[in-house]
Amino acid sequence: MQNSLLISVLIVWLTASSAVLADETSVVARILQQDQGRSYGVMVGDMIHQRFVVEVKPPYSIIQSSLPQSGELNYWLELRDVAVSTKESDDRTLYLIDLKYQTFYAPLDVRTLTIPGIKLDFSAGEQRFQLHLPDWQFTMSPIKEITPGGVGNNNNAAAFMKAAIAPKTFSLDELNQRLGLLAAATSMVVIALLWLNGLLPKLGQSPFIGAARQIRRIKRRRHTAREDYLACLQSVHQAINQRAQTTVFAGQLDDFLAQFPQFSSLRDELTMFFRQSRDAFFMDKQPDPILINDCLDLCREMAAADKVTAVK
Amino acid sequence: MNQPTHASVPAMSDWHKLIQKTEQSINQTILGQEAIVRQMMIATLSRGHILLEGDVGVGKTTLLKTVAETLGGCFERIEGTIDLMPHDLVYYTYIAESGKPGVSPGPVLKHGDALSIFFFNEINRARPQVHSLLLRIMAERSVHAFNQTYHFPHLQVFADRNRIEKDETFELPAAARDRFMMELHVEQPKAEAQLKDLMFNPRFHDADKLVNSAEKAILPYQHLNDIAVQIQQQVKASSALQDYGFHLCRALREPGEYGIQISDVEVSKLIKGGMGPRGISYLARGARVNAWLNQREAIIPEDFHVIIKQIAKHRIFLNPVYDYNREQIIDALIAAALDTIASP
């Protein structure tokens, strides 16, 4: 007896649940989610975003023409944009419908307004199904008083003007500090790279110091070839040219000494240098082995006499 | 007309004395033009043609006549005029005593291969047709007439023009100017004593007498070609010097590549044409002669400096935008190239 009662209750429950399930599965389309945003405190000019997620059973699909067209719906409401995106899976299709309204209603007091619902049509061959996106009610608030406050105010447009809101300022101190640090670090890296590559101008240093350094480097070599002698002479020539900021030839020695009188005491040495250079480069004579020392001594003396010399 | 007086071949060592004597003789006749005379000697020993230009009355013609007389050999002179035609250089026609028409060789052909100096006075007054014939005479030292080719192995062309007058003149084409080894600018002497001498000394008042007073035919013209070849063979040009000469000439053609800057000039667009192979060859030849004249065995950079203006200036052609200030710009370009190109 007790068992038969239990079985009958189970049968009733199964029947009821299968009926519910049958009802669920028979719905072709339904709204899974909807979001209309805040339904109060809407003011003239505000944008109202409505989002619906609609689930549709296959093989139904939305009839595009049933979607609302953007444009003015009535004297105060405009549908600015309609966007539909689709997500398909085996057992359902999800439509994300995004509607953007803008209200131009200018209420004098708090007023309830309604955005009309939308009927969406779905089809599967000959069969059709209609889903109703519901109306939405919201309250709009005025943006100004009915009459301007204060004594002696006229009821004109200027009376309702409010002070402009001061722009919000963000402190850039931290960013400036970071930028400064970054710039300083970059400059240091660039300077270090230039220095490592020998591209940094040696400010205040006589070119003869650099020439002497080059000649010393050549002198340290165990075997000295003719090219090494020529390189020594060339270093001195380059230093003289650099100092004069023009090319100085033997015939222009007097001009050079007139321009840089600090070297006048070295006239004989310079004359000798130009003669040695001429013999080596143009007369193809074998340079004297003492030439390297002569060039080095000349560079040292020129650097010592050079007025711009900062480092000896 | 002068006839060759030197039959024997002077030794190489004697040539220095002969050149020195020639220069002295010319400098005693023409005052204050020592540098120009030296340039003319260099051109002569390089077997190059010379174009003289300058103001009116500075003695261009007298100088050329004197140099021509001093060098020796047969000398011919023709005046550039607007109606001068090429055949006037080659032949002239006349009515002979017999009453029949006669044709005789003109100034170019008259002396055959003994012609050593052809002096073209006021060359820019002659028409381009005459310039064209002159091109061949200068480049090939030959001309074709009377069904045969005449050769002038010892010929050197001297020409002059003045830059003051522009009416009824014809600018020498670039090709003709390029055939002149040097274009020398003659200015009046600057020294007060020399100017006073030219002003008051009657010796300088009669140009013809003055030219006749100069010693004639000092140089054996028929051996000039040989000595020129010997100089080119004997005087060395080291590799460092060759590098310098190459870069110097290149800087005049492509100044932008060498970072040369001239105020108010866009250097990359400045040059339209520059020192070509003939020009750079003349520069090297002239440098060798200058080294030899200074009794050196090899060329040094300063040998280029002595002649670079005279050889390069008339060979550089500028973009027409800069032609209005041609003289100053080219002077600045050459000076900048000399200051920029280092040697060694």
Image (cartoon, coloured by chain):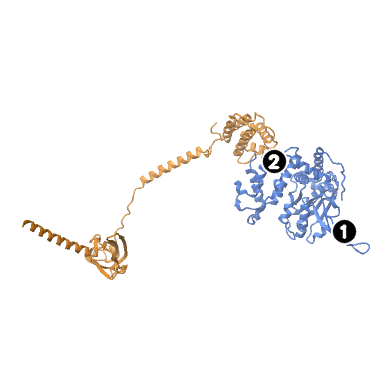
The residue beneath circle 1 is B104
Q: Is residue A258 above or below residue B158?
A: above
Q: Which residue is mark 2?
A: B302
Q: Quadrant of the C terminus of chain B?
A: top right
Q: Residue at x 32, y 64 (%)?
A: A81
Query: Is residue A284 something one can see in this rendering?
Result: yes
Residue B182 has which mark? Answer: none
Left or right, residue A240 beside residue B309: left
Q: Colour of chain B?
A: blue
Three-letter amino acid code of the residue under disc 1: Ser
In this figure, what is the number of numbered marks?
2
Between A258 and A13, the residue placed more toward the observer is: A13
Task: Look at the image and give the colour of chain A.
Answer: orange
| Residue situated in front as seen by the camera: A311 or A35 | A35
Label 1 residue SS: strand
Q: Chain of mark 2?
A: B
Q: Position of residue B26 (x, y in %)?
A: 81, 45
Q: Left or right: B130 with respect to A35?
A: right
Q: Is residue A202 above or below residue B163?
A: above
Chain ID of residue with mark 1? B
Image location of residue A299, percent across then percent down = 60, 32
Amino acid of disc 2: Glu
When the figure is inspected, residue B143 is found, relative to residue B226, above or below; the finding is below
Q: Secondary structure at mark 2?
A: helix
